[in-house]
Amino acid sequence: SQQGEEDPQALSIQEGENATMNCSYKTSINNLQWYRQNSGRGLVHLILIRSNEREKHSGRLRVTLDTSKKSSSLLITASRAADTASYFCATDGTASKLTFGTGTRLQVTL
Amino acid sequence: NAGVTQTPKFQVLKTGQSMTLQCAQDMNHEYMSWYRQDPGMGLRLIHYSVGAGITDQGEVPNGYNVSRSTTEDFPLRLLSAAPSQTSVYFCASKILWEGDTGELFFGEGSRLTVL
C-alpha cells in the first residue's frame, strides 16, 4: 500500500504564482524527500527533510514537515513554465526502502 | 558519469514470453532497486539489493526475479509476462553506507507492454 499520498492530484497555475502541494503519510519516518518527474523521464531528487527538522529551503523550494500530523508540504515560489512536472513525496521508514506517494501533476501556464 | 542506465527503453511482449530489463550504474552505489509506475498508483517497489549477492522483496515482487552478481548491474527478469505487468519500470540506486544522503538516482525508465 502507498505510504504517502499527495494533494491535490493536479494543480494548474500561471507563471509567477506560487504552487503548494501536500503529502500525508501513515507511519513514522526517518526522513521525507520530494522528487520531480518530467513527462516521460525518470525522477529527480529535489530536497530531503529529516524527521527532526520542521522547515527546509533550497532555492525557490520550501519544504515543511509536521510529524505530529504526518504531513509535509512543498512550496514552489514564483513558478515558471519549466516547473511543469509531476511531484512525488517519498518516505524512508526503514533503512533500505523508499516509499513513494501517488504524485501531484503541476501545470504552469504562461 | 552515465549514472543509471536502463535498457531497453521500450519493449512489447506477448503473454507468456520472458525477458530481462537491464540496469547498470557507474557510481559504485551499494543500493539498487526496481520500481514500477502505473497511472494513479505512483511508484511501487518490486525488488531491491543492498550489495552484490544480496536481494530482497519489495511491495510487489510476484512475477519478477532479480539477481546482483556485481555492484554495477541489477537485472529484472520477467519469467512469464502477463498483461498486468504492462507498466513503466524504473531502476534506481543510491549510496547506502558512509555518505548516504538518502537521495535515489533514477534511470530514464523502460516502458513495457504485454499483449
Image (cartoon, coloured by chain):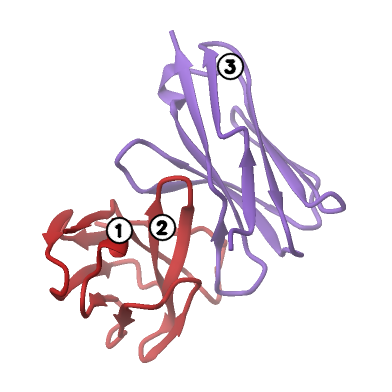
Chain colours: A purple, B red
Compare marks 2 and 1 and give the one earlier in the sequence.
1
| Helix, strand or loop under label 3 | loop
Local packing at callout 1 (Cα closer than 10 Å; few below 14, some 14-19, many 20+) is: some
| Helix, strand or loop under label 2 | strand
Asked if A89 appears above or below B33 in the picture, the reply is above
How many discs mark residues in the rendered view? 3
| Helix, strand or loop under label 1 | loop
Asked if A87 appears above or below B103 in the picture, the reply is above
Q: CA distance from mark 1 to mark 3?
A: 31 Å
Q: CA distance from mark 2 to mark 1?
A: 8 Å
Three-letter residue code for mark 2: Phe
Report the front residue among A50 and A8: A8
Residue labelled with disc 3? A78
Residue drawn at point x = 67 percent, y = 68 percent:
A93
Protein chain holding label 1:
B
* Residues tagged 1 and 3 counted as in contact (Cβ below 8 A): no
Residue labelled with disc 2? B105
Q: Is residue B30 something one can see in this rendering?
A: no
Asked if B31 appears above or below A20 in the picture, the reply is below
Asked if A99 appears above or below A95 in the picture, the reply is above
On the same chain, marks 2 and 1? The answer is yes
Three-letter residue code for mark 1: Gly
Three-letter residue code for mark 3: Ala
Residue labelled with disc 1? B3
Local packing at callout 3 (Cα closer than 10 Å; few below 14, some 14-19, many 20+) is: some
Q: Quadrant of the C terminus of chain A?
A: top left
Q: CA distance from mark 3 to mark 2?
A: 27 Å
Q: Position of residue B41 (x, y in %)?
A: 48, 51
Query: Disc 1 vs disc 3: which is toward the camera?
Result: 3
* Residues tagged 3 and 2 counted as in contact (Cβ below 8 A): no
